[in-house]
Image: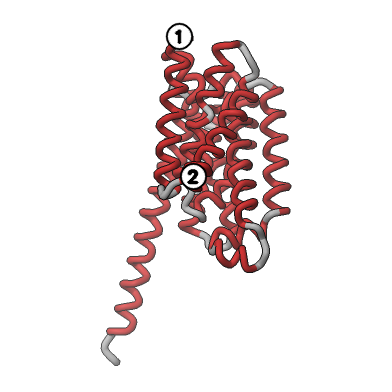
């Protein structure tokens, strides 16, 4: 039984994949907690797909993929801000327009470049089993930066998550705080997509923090619980993909989403049981 757990990680590529996954979970859970608390999941999804054109152009031209992704993310964030400020459209509409437009452009560029299906799959789902030591190092740096900014900006992030008006009254510059938060989301996506793919990064940003929100209320606790759920998903997902011959990234993403519904079901069952005991206690006949 123990061999089933230890055998996969006897290989260097599996250990690199595990380290990259755990580091990505750390960074994405920290920023993902704020994303979930602010109801910004759609923006996170849009950014995960919004980097596609820059990656695709750099990929076709043989340029730097990280630089291409960064430029694309900046265009995405700037476009959403411009559309929201210059029109009567809400943020959701602006995000939706840029999301569809950037995704379509990225797919068009990749299809023009040649091996459409394979290239698109690599960008969306990454190559977790081909993670290099350099990529692990890049993700580690991004995780350290995310942790440092989260600690430094904790109060502005926290106040903005509950009330933009209160953040303005307290002089916390909510517009700047919002941009810093988006920049962190973009950085996590950009530095992790080569290892785990944009789809899995988005799954990490949303699923573990959403699961943690079901069982915790304090932000630091949510972050720790989110990292725990995400890390478990990475570890178990890699074991399943190794032994069953499944693609690693979709397997891990599926497990993180499944964990949310399992925890939700258990929580509702516990709450119903408590409510039933409460009713019985208060309606029991006096003896």
| Kind of element beneath mark 2 | helix
Q: Are marks 1 and 2 in contact (CB under 8 Å)?
A: no
How packed mark 2 is, by other alpha carbons closer than 10 Å (few <14, some 14-19, many 20 or more), is many
Q: Quadrant of residue 139?
A: top right
Q: In this rendering, would 49 be left or right of 170?
A: left
Q: Position of residue 281 (x, y in %)?
A: 33, 81
Q: Which mark is residue 125?
A: none
Q: Residue at x 47, y 15 (%)?
A: 110
Q: For the point 68% across and 39% down, which residue is it?
A: 143
The vertical placement of 1 against 220, above or below, is above
Q: Is residue 127 visible?
A: no
Upstream in sequence: badge 1 or badge 2: 1
Direction bottom: furthest residue: 287
Q: Where does residue 31 sit, x and y in percent of width and height?
A: 59, 46
Q: Please provide percent x and percent y for residue 204.
A: 52, 40
Q: Secondary structure at mark 1?
A: loop
The residue closer to the viewer here, 44 or 103, is 103
Above or below residue 122? Residue 224 is below
Q: Residue at x 70, y 48 (%)?
A: 149
Task: Give the camera-side residue of 232 and 91.
Answer: 91
User: Is 277 placed above or below 91 here?
Assistant: below
Rendered position, 196 above or below 96? above
Residue for badge 1: 115
Q: Position of residue 261 (x, y in %)?
A: 38, 48
For marks 1 and 2, give the one nearer the viewer: 1
Mark 1 and mark 2: span between their CA atoms? 31 Å
Residue at 67% in and 43% down = 146
Circle 2 residue: 206
Q: Which quadrant: the C terminus? A: bottom left
As drawn, is 62 to the left or to the right of 137? left
Q: Is residue 225 visible?
A: yes
């Amino acid at each position: 039984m123990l061999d089933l757990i230890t055998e996969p990680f006897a290989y260097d590529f599996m250990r690199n994949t595990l380290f990259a996954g755990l580091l990505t979970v750390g960074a994405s859970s920290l920023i993902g907690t704020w994303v979930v608390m602010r109801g910004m999941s759609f923006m996170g999804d849009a950014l995960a797909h919004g980097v596609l054109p820059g990656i695709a152009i750099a990929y076709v031209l043989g340029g730097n993929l990280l630089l291409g992704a960064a430029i694309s993310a900046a265009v995405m964030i700037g476009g959403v801000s411009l559309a929201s400020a210059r029109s009567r459209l809400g943020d959701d509409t602006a995000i939706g327009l840029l999301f569809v437009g950037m995704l379509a452009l990225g797919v068009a560029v990749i299809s023009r470049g040649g091996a459409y299906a394979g290239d698109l799959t690599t960008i969306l789902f990454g190559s977790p089993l081909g993670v290099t030591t350099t990529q692990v190092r890049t993700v580690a740096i991004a995780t350290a930066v995310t942790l440092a900014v989260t600690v430094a900006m904790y109060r502005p992030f926290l106040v903005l998550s509950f009330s933009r008006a209160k953040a303005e009254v307290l002089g916390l510059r909510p517009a700047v705080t919002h941009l810093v938060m988006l920049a962190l989301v973009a950085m996590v996506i950009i530095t992790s997509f080569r290892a785990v793919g944009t789809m899995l990064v988005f799954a990490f940003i949303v699923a573990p923090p959403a699961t943690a929100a079901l069982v915790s209320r304090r932000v630091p606790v949510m972050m720790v619980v989110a990292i725990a759920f995400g890390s478990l998903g990475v570890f178990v997902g890699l074991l399943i993909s190794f032994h069953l011959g499944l693609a690693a990234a979709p397997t891990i993403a599926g497990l993180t989403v499944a964990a949310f519904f399992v925890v939700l079901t258990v929580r509702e069952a516990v709450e119903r049981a408590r409510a039933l005991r409460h009713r019985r206690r208060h309606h029991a006949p006096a003896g």
